[in-house]
Amino acid sequence: MEQSTRFVGMDVHKDTIVVAVTATGEVGKATAYGTFPNTAAALEKLVKRLRQAGDGPIKFCYEAGPCGYGVHRTLTRTGEECMVVAPSMIPRKSGERQKTDKRDAASLAVLHRGGLLTAVWVPDAAHEAMRDLIRARQAAVRAVRAARQQMSAFLLRHERIYPNGKRAWTKAHRGWLADQTFAQPAHQIVLEECIEAVRQGEQRRERVDGYLRAQIPSWSLFPLVQNLCALRGLDMIVGAGLAAAIGDPSRFATAPHFMAYLGMVPSEHTSGPKRRIGAITKAGDVHARTLLIEAAHSYRYPARIGRHKLAAVDAVPEAVRAIAWKAQTRLCQRYRQMTAKGKPNQVVVTAIARELAGFVWSIACITSDPVVSGNVVTEAYDEGTTLWNEVTIASEEVARQIQQITPDTGRLHAPRHQSLKGTARRTSKTGQTRAGSAERSQTG
């Protein structure tokens, strides 16, 4: 007789783990199983007890939180299946006002039994270490920004304003700060302490940058970081941040899925015949989305490969080089077109960053599996065409389809058999259209 599957929900805390168990075919709440210490030995003892109680498979789950992935790694090492659940995707009752550890564990077990939980991607130890180093750099950058804002606010309260039209935090601005004096000794002390806080923060940021650059070549995702550096607006630090957010590219079936993961697709409220499109969702990795937004500003200039980019472009394969140049020519042209239409600057930059995320996904697919990457992107295109056409920020802004990579040459070709939804075809200006097509075919 086939044994039923048991689902174990765990509410993990710093010192304890509250466990609840339910099985396939059961109805109602899960059964409380007890409270165990949050140690590897206690988890192994729990697994041993559950195995002695029955021969069926066991599936564990717990919410992702500040305790990390230690519980997952311990259970995986013992041969058990464990899911780390995304807390924001857990179904919750709106009228429920009682929350306890036992209730949370039982709720996780019941939802896991019904297949209503969404798992998060669990990185390995080396990837998690690099991600922590990247987060340490984020903290250093935020500390420098906070120290500078504190100094600027202090000077503004005392009517010490740097001349308009000049850029702050340059060599001239630092000389101006050194020349500032106050009649009150306490004010002078505050100024010197603010200057010292900025200096120490900048030194810490540069130090962490050096550590990060030294660790990237030994990282398993170094080929992806190196290929991402071929894109305009991305360097080694930015590429490492995006690689840490991507992790395993195979978990994103299409480019729109990757955009939705970064929160760069518009929110929508549709009811009946009315369809309302709002601002982007801003879900997912904030750091990766910020890096793409900052990189999108560089596409306001004409398409060209700068002197500082030559070495990075020459170090990548031909297929990646073709994607990077196609991204640059397309996004620079779209930036000028959207600006000419009178779109707000933040709308233009966000739209460019969203399309840039699609090219990042394409490069990640090629880097992870160069042999079948063309087939992967080709099959994913058909699935994601509808969503890609509907991705927009303003009512008139509709993004184009992700470029298709042919497996034989690695070049980019835009599918022409489908029209863009929501955009009006231009019957006039035929000469400009033909000239633009000829220019794209030559640059591609």
Image (spheres, rainbow, N blue to C red):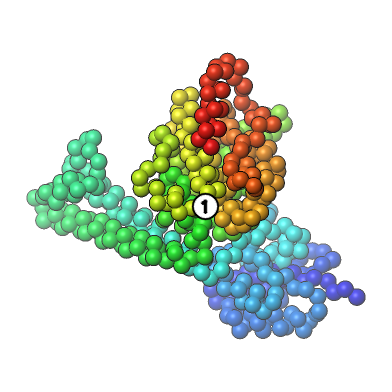
Q: Is residue 338 left or right of residue 180?
A: right
Q: Is residue 90 left or right of residue 217?
A: right
The answer to which of 342 and 59 lies nearer the viewer is 342
* Image coords of residue 440 (percent x, y): 53, 32
Q: Residue at the spot x=57%, y=18% of the render?
A: 430
Q: Quadrant of the N terminus?
A: bottom right
- The residue positioned 58% from the left and 34% from the top of the image is 399
- Residue 269 position by quadrant: top right
Q: Is residue 309 above or below residue 223?
A: above
* Total tally of numbered discs in the picture: 1
Outermost residue to the right: 1
377, 83: nearer the viewer: 377
Q: Quadrant of residue 280?
A: top right
Q: What is the crowding at mark 1: few (fewer than 14 residues within 10 Å), some, or many (at least 20)?
A: some
**Of residues 409 and 9, which is closer to you in this image?**
409
Q: Which residue is mark 1?
A: 317
Is any atom of residue 267 visible in this view?
A: no
Quadrant of residue 86 within the rendered picture? bottom right
Q: Position of residue 30 (x, y in %)?
A: 75, 68
* Residue at point 39%, 62% (across, down): 213
- Counting from the top left corner in percent of width and height, residue 323 is at 53, 44
Residue type, numbered disc 1? Pro
